[in-house]
Image (tube, helix red, strand yellow):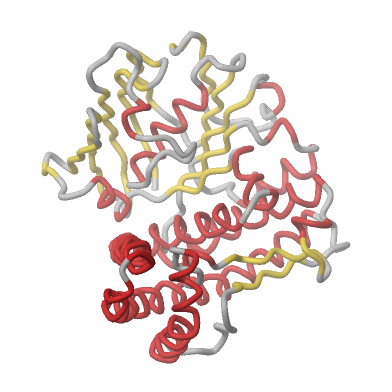
């Protein structure tokens, strides 16, 4: 998988930018000049939203009515082109054909993003860890985004009904309808998350072992209202239904659904202890690197093609041995590296460098 060329118009502080890429691309310059904006623009072609967690409208350059991105790339030795237009929302086309949803671009272009933002995956609450799993699954499973939307819609309807039931108890019988919908879509989400965590763990274990020089061991466990391991989708659905029955009165009192995949977590352990509660900053950073490299390795195995590696301002924060370890894992992939000083990664002998200043290339 390789990007050959990108055109960027009115993305954040970038008014116009046209770049041709190599296998290794080092994007350097001072802070707040547009390096991450370029990485963000590339990442949008995976069909996902911004990894910075902003709305589409916030991507458009101030005082501009729209933003436009064009990309020439190749996968499976096939030349393709894609375009994204952002006004209030995103629209996309692939090889000149308008797509029903921008997310469909994710079936053609895969990428793994490393950013300091992802340290929150260990440091913060479960929402960041769920987002990591769901983002990875969206790149692997074409129907997973639709499944998430179905679940979120049913969850929203049930929560609205819980608030109404609190005021009007006669509506309580209607909750069973949404329980059924939640259990059905929720069981499929949980099953796929559990299988993904199980598949991810061997890769994360090997990589973390390398990052820690064999001194520490990482472990991953999907945590919910019951043990998901070795359960089928039907078994999970039945157990979820029972849990909704048990928690119904509590949910009515709280006016919110208190169990389900929207409350689950992935526990990250180092030598059997919580990385969030007991891990040092260095250990937590190694956890994130291990998880992201494992994500990339699993993506490669399941799609039989190397994803893009987008390394946003992480290499300069690592010692040389860890930098080399990462680069060795992705040595055959197309890599985009942002940093303040190109010399920190110029051990890479081949490739291109781009100095970014004021939203442009010098």
Label total for image: 0
Residue 70 location in percent, x, y?
26, 30
Q: Which residue is drawn at the image coordinates 30% and 55% (left, top)?
A: 107
Residue at 31% x, 18% y is: 10
Residue 193: give x, y in percent of width and height.
49, 71
Q: Quadrant of residue 58?
A: top left
- What is the x, y in percent for residue 209? 78, 62
Locate residue 342: give its quadrant.
Answer: top right
Nearest to the observer: residue 334 or residue 358: 358
In the drawing, does residue 70 fall left or right of residue 131?
A: left
Q: Residue at x 52, y 30 (%)?
A: 25
Please, is residue 30 above or below residue 86 in the view? Answer: above
Q: Residue at x 66, y 36 (%)?
A: 314
Using the rendered image of the protein, determine whether residue 151 is visible from the camera's viewpoint. Answer: no
User: Observer-nearest residue: 53 or 295?
Assistant: 53
**Res. 134 image quadrant:** bottom left
Image coordinates of residue 328 in percent, x first then y, are 66, 49
Residue sitting farthest toward the right: 215
- Left/right of residue 300 with respect to residue 278 in the rendered view: left
- Residue 78 visible in the picture: yes
Residue 14 drawn above or below residue 208: above
């Amino acid at each position: 998988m390789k990007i050959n060329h990108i055109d960027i118009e009115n993305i954040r502080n970038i008014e116009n930018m046209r770049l041709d890429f190599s296998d290794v691309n080092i994007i350097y310059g001072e802070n707040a000049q547009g390096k991450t904006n370029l990485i963000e623009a590339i990442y949008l072609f995976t069909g996902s939203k911004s990894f910075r967690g902003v709305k589409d409208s916030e991507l458009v350059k101030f005082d501009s009515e729209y933003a436009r991105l064009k990309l020439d790339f190749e996968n499976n030795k096939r030349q393709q082109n894609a375009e994204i237009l952002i006004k209030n929302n995103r629209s996309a086309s692939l090889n000149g054909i308008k797509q029903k949803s921008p997310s469909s671009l994710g079936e053609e272009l895969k990428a793994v993003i490393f950013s300091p933002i992802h340290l929150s995956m260990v440091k913060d609450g479960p929402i960041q860890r769920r987002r990591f799993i769901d983002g990875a699954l969206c790149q692997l499973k074409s129907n997973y985004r639709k499944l998430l939307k179905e679940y979120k819609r049913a969850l929203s309807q049930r929560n609205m009904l819980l608030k109404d039931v609190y005021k009007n108890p006669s509506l309580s019988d209607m909750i069973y309808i949404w329980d059924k919908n939640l259990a059905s879509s929720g069981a499929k989400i949980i099953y796929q998350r559990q299988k993904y965590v199980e598949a991810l763990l061997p890769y994360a274990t090997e990589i973390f072992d390398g990052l820690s020089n064999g001194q520490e061991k990482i472990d991953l466990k999907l945590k919910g209202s019951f043990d998901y391991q070795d359960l089928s989708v039907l078994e999970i659905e039945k157990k979820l239904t029972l849990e909704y029955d048990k928690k119904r009165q509590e949910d009515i009192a709280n006016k919110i659904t208190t169990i389900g995949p929207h409350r689950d977590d992935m526990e990250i352990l180092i030598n059997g202890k919580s990385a969030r509660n007991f891990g040092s900053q260095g250990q937590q950073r190694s956890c994130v690197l291990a998880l992201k490299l494992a994500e990339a390795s699993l993506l490669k195995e399941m799609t039989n093609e190397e994803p893009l590696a987008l390394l946003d301002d992480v290499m300069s924060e690592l010692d040389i041995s860890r930098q080399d370890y990462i680069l060795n894992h992705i040595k055959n992939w197309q890599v985009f590296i942002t940093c303040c000083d190109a010399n920190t990664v110029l051990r890479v002998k081949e490739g291109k460098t781009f100095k970014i200043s004021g939203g442009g290339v010098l």
